[in-house]
Image: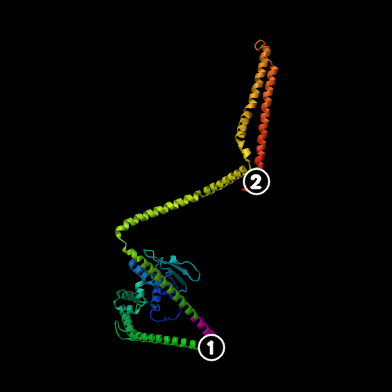
Amino acid sequence: MRLTRIEIEGFGSLQGVDLRFGPAMNLVVGPNEAGKSTLQEAIVTGLYGLRSGDGARAATVERADRWRPWQGGDFGLALEFELDDGTQLRVERDLDAETARVTDVGTGADLTDRFDRDASGVLQLGRQLLGVSRDIYTNTACISRSEVMRLEDAGSIKEVIVALADSAHPDRTAQRVLDRLRQERVHRIGKPRGRSGPLHDLESRLAELERQLGAARQARASVDELAQKRETVGALTEAELGIVQTLDAAVLASRLEEGRHRLERVQAMEQAINEERSRQEEHTRFAMFPLDRQSDVQELRSHLRATKEAQEEFERRAADVAPQVRQLEAERAKLDADAQGYETRARGIDSAALTHEPAVRELLSALNVGDAQAPEGHLRAQTAAEDARRLAERHPGLIGQNLDWSTRQREFQRVYSEWRERHTVALEARRRAGAERAVAQPSGAAGA
C-alpha cells in the first residue's frame, strides 16, 4: 500500500493540515518543533487508532491526552492510500468518539464492515492491511532516532523479521538478513549509543544549519523592514510629508488633550481627598465622646426617630383631611357671606317696623295654627249641623221646636267670615313682608 494523502482536523500542534504525497520518496523538512514527529504519529494513528497492541486502557487515555489538539477543536484525521490492486481507500477517524469509517475513494462505498474488529470493537485496519501490529510497525517501518537506538533490544521485532525473511526468501537465512541489517545500520546510521557516525554528524550539521538559517532569516527580516521603510519615505512627496506631519501633530495634540483630562481627573480626585480629610477632621471631636453617655444618646435617638415617625403620620393624616378642611372653610366662607347678607338686609328695615316684630311673629304663628285648624273646625261644624238636622227630622221630639237654625247658621257664617277676614289680613301682611325683604335684598348685596 502507498500513502497518498492525510487530512488533519486537529492532532497535537497540527490543525487544519492537508498534505498529498507523490509516488516516489517524500521528504518532510522543517525546523525543530514544527510538527514532523506529530505528523508521523498522526499517520500511525490513522492506521491503528489510539489503542496499542495490548489494548491497555490507561495507555490509550495517556496517548489521547498527549495528542489532543493544543488549540482545541475537533480531534480527528483522515488517511487516503492506494493498494497494490489499484483500490483507493479513505479512513476517517473521530478520535474523541474512537470511531473509524473506511470508504472507497472512487465509488464512495462504505467498506468498514470488510475489516475485522478486536474484542473491544476496535477496527483492525492496520493489522489487516500490513499484517503486523502497531508496535512492530512503529519499530520497523516507522522508526525514530530513539527507537533506532533501542532496536537491539526488540526481540519480538527480530522474530517477525525472521518470519518474514524465511517466508519471503527461503534461500536466505534469517541470521544473514540480520547481519546485513546491522552492517547497513552501522554504515548508514552509526553504532547504537555512539557519539560518532553519519547520523550524529548529520544531526550536528542540521542543528548548525538551522541556527544559521534562523540568524539569516532574522537579518533578512530586518533588511526587508529597513528597505520597506526607505521605499515608503522615498515615495512620499512634500504634500504627503506635510500630511504626515499634520497627522503627527494631531496625534500629539490628542495625547496632550488626553494628558490634560487625566490631570483634571487627578486634581478632582485630590480635591475629593481633601474634602474627605476635612470631614474627618470635623468628626474628630466625636472621638472624645464619653462612652457612658452612649445609652442616653441611643435613647434620645430612639425618641427622635419616634417623633419623626409621629410627625410623618400627622402630616399624612393632615394631607388626608386637607380636602375636608378646605370644604369646611368654603362652607364657613359661604355662611359668613350669608350672615353678612342677612345683616345687610336687616339694616334696611326701619326701627318702627322692628317694634312690631313680636306682634307680627305672634300673628304669623296664630295664623299658621288657624290655617291648620280652621278647615278641620269648619268641616266638623258643618258635619255637626247636618247630623243635628237629620236627627231633628227623624226625631222631632228630641230637639226643642224653639231651636233657631237660621240664627245658628247666621252666627256660624259671621264667625267664619271674621276668620276669613283675619286670614286675608294675615296673608296680606305676609305678602308685604316678603315684598319688603325682596326690596332690601339688592341693597344688602350692594353693601356687602
Q: Which residue is mark 1?
A: 235
| Residue 58 in sight from this viewpoint | yes
Left-right relation of 35 to 433: left
How many numbered marks, from 0 up? Answer: 2
Tag 2, which secondary structure? helix
Who is closer to the viewer here, 186 or 301?
301
Magenta part of the chain: 231-252
Colouring convention used in this rendered image of the protein: rainbow
Which residue sits at x=66%, y=19%?
385
The local crowd at label 1, few if under 14, some if 14 to 19, many if 20 or more residues have their Cα within 10 Å, is few
Q: Main secondary structure of the magenta part?
A: helix
> What amino acid is labelled 1 in the image?
Ala
Could you tell me if residue 131 is visible in this image?
no
Quadrant of the image occupied by residue 43: bottom left
| Label 1 residue SS | helix
Residue at (30, 78) in percent of width and height: 150
Q: Is residue 300 magenta?
A: no
Disc 2 designates what residue? 443
